[in-house]
Amino acid sequence: MARPTTDDAAAWALTALMVVSGVSHFTSPGYFRELVPSWLPARSAVVAVSGAADIAVGVLVAVPATRRTGARATAALITAYLPAHLEPLRHRRTAQRAFDRPIGIAARVVVNLAYVAWAAAVARRATGRPRTG
């Protein structure tokens, strides 16, 4: 049996982040609806689809044979979420929550860019095949 590596730990942590995030879309949909840009229709559907996508890419990252694809898909998905984090800039004069003010928006973008870098690193290190002992 192969010994777990730090690459495995990074992949499993990314899996956990994405699956927990995805499940949270269904357990706390109101929070995620508020993050959907106002110019997108069907906010509830966007939340459900993005939650399912988070779970799907998380599962792909968990499986060594699909880890590279899953990590690349994770990076792409989180990148696609960046407009949602920038949306509050359109309403900054009326922002009530700290994370909707410019410094909060900047923090959200930096954190999400770190997630993209993390997913890209997992993808680079993935072998695309199961480890053997």
Image (tube, rainbow, N blue to C red):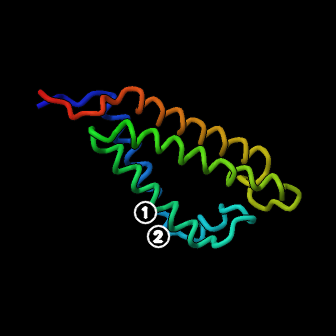
Tags 2 and 1 in contact by the CB under 8 Å rule? yes
Direction from residue 24 to residue 83 in the image, left or right:
right
Residue at screen point 68% across, 54% down: 84
Number of residues whose C-alpha sits closer than 10 Å to that of mark 2, classed few (under 14), some (14–19) or many (20 or more):
few
Secondary structure category for the residue under label 2? helix
Which residue is under mark 1? 23
Left or right: residue 34 versus residue 16 is: right
- Name the residue carrying label 2: 27
Tag of residue 14: none
Question: In which quadrant of the rendered image does the N terminus lie?
Answer: top left
Residue that appears at 73% across and 47% down: 105
Residue 127 image offset from top left, x and y in percent: 30, 28
x and y percent of residue 100 in the render? 75, 55
Residue at horizontal 39 percent and vertical 55 percent from the top = 56
| Crowd rating for badge 1 (residues with CA inside 10 Å; few <14, some 14–19, many 20+) | some
* Residue type, mark 1 in image: Val
Give the percent coordinates (x, y) of residue 38. 74, 65
The extreme right residue here reads 93
**Quadrant of image for the C terminus:** top left
